Image (cartoon, rainbow, N blue to C red):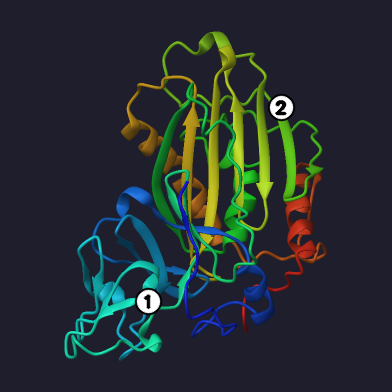
Amino acid sequence: MTATCASLPSASVDLPRNCTFEPADWQILARSWYPVALSHDLGDSPMGVTLLDAPLVVYRADGDIVIADDLCPHRGVPLSMGNGNGKTIACAYHGFRFGQDGRCVRVPAHPDSKIPPKLHLRTYPVVERFGLIWTCLRPTGETNLPPMPHWDDPAFQQITCPWIDIKGFAGRQVEGFIDVAHFAFVHTETFADPENPIVPSYSPKLTETGFEAEYRSNVSNFPHGLLGVEEFADFEWLRHFRVFLPFTATLEIHFPNDGRLVIMNAASPVSARVTRMFAPICRNFDTTGSVEDVYEFNRRVFEEDRQIVEAQKPENLPLDPNLEAHVMADRSSIAYRRGLRGMGLSHFFTA
């Protein structure tokens, strides 16, 4: 893990332009950590990303990763339009160069003049973990990244899948990930059995960061068409969900023969209506198998979910329990919504 701290000047409490969240909700959500990019996607060139409606630039500077507002303080051009060399990035308009800690290190028009502090970028803290680059827009002093079981276990293979963009709210996407009643209707092309929709009883347990739920059933997690799995037709599968509020969850699936598969669902809110979903995975079986096959199967599963999330109305996640109907299978959903209310969140969307 590597970390760099925010530098001068300190972040203000101003909301992003065209913010899609209720102001009070934005301030609460901005205190949490989210992934914004894959570590291996970041080369020498600056990368533009958006988190909670805030445009950010991500770049490498002499071994460090810098995240800053994607705006040159000179004339307001996005720095992601510029170029980089692994040490600095240059604005596309006047060539101002920025390096470690977001400091302006060169003004080509006046190379011998002292650089005023006003030209330094507003930066945000950075942590690399699970093959992802994480940041927080309104840090509180603690680096509260969600945990992922077995990621550091040498017996496990670690895989960071390509991200998926979803035209829907992060809360809706996370709720779908922890839902146990949709398998037989949404995932019938990948792993589930349309004739096996029954949801056995389960009970979420509250934790300091959210809740956990263990769900046992005979719904297989083997991909359809996989050879040699017939002998496990009566196997009882254990799915262990761990929810880290507001928008991250992990699912640890207990396979036959002590196999384990852990999937992290890290929903990064680009806006209140767009989510970039990151999915690190680790497993202790088939550890020399094709990573591309893992990418493809993961993509197919999440594409099935994406179609549902993008069709849901209302687009936001109703936190008032009286606004949608609930059944016994929705215990995780109810616990999740209760947890978001406990954070002080309300409507999410602006009018």
Residue 28 x/y as whole percent: 67, 71
**Precedes in sequence: disc 1 or disc 2:** 1
Tag 2: amino acid: Arg
Q: Tell me which corner region of the image, top left, top right, bottom left or bottom right, holds residue 110.
A: bottom left
Per the image, the residue denoted by label 2 is: 216
Residue at image position (55%, 57%) is 309
Q: Residues within 10 Å of mark 2 (few under 14, many from 20)?
A: some
Of 327 and 251, the residue lying toward us = 251
Q: Mark 1 points at which residue?
A: 70
Visible residue check, residue 49 = no
- For the point 79% across and 66% down, the residue is 320
- Which SS class for mark 2? strand
Q: Picture coordinates of residue 30 (x, y %)? A: 60, 70
Residue at x 78%, y 51% (from the top left corner): 335
Q: Which amino acid does label 1 sit on?
A: Asp
- The reply, left or right, for residue 233 in relation to residue 198 is left
Task: State the image quarter where residue 144 is shown.
Answer: bottom right
Closest to the observer, 70 or 235: 70
Distance (Cα) linking label 1 and label 2: 46 Å
- Give the residue drawn at x 67%, y 38%: 241
| Image quarter of the C terminus | bottom right
Residue nearer the viewer, 45 or 281 = 45
Q: Is residue 152 left or right of residue 61?
A: right
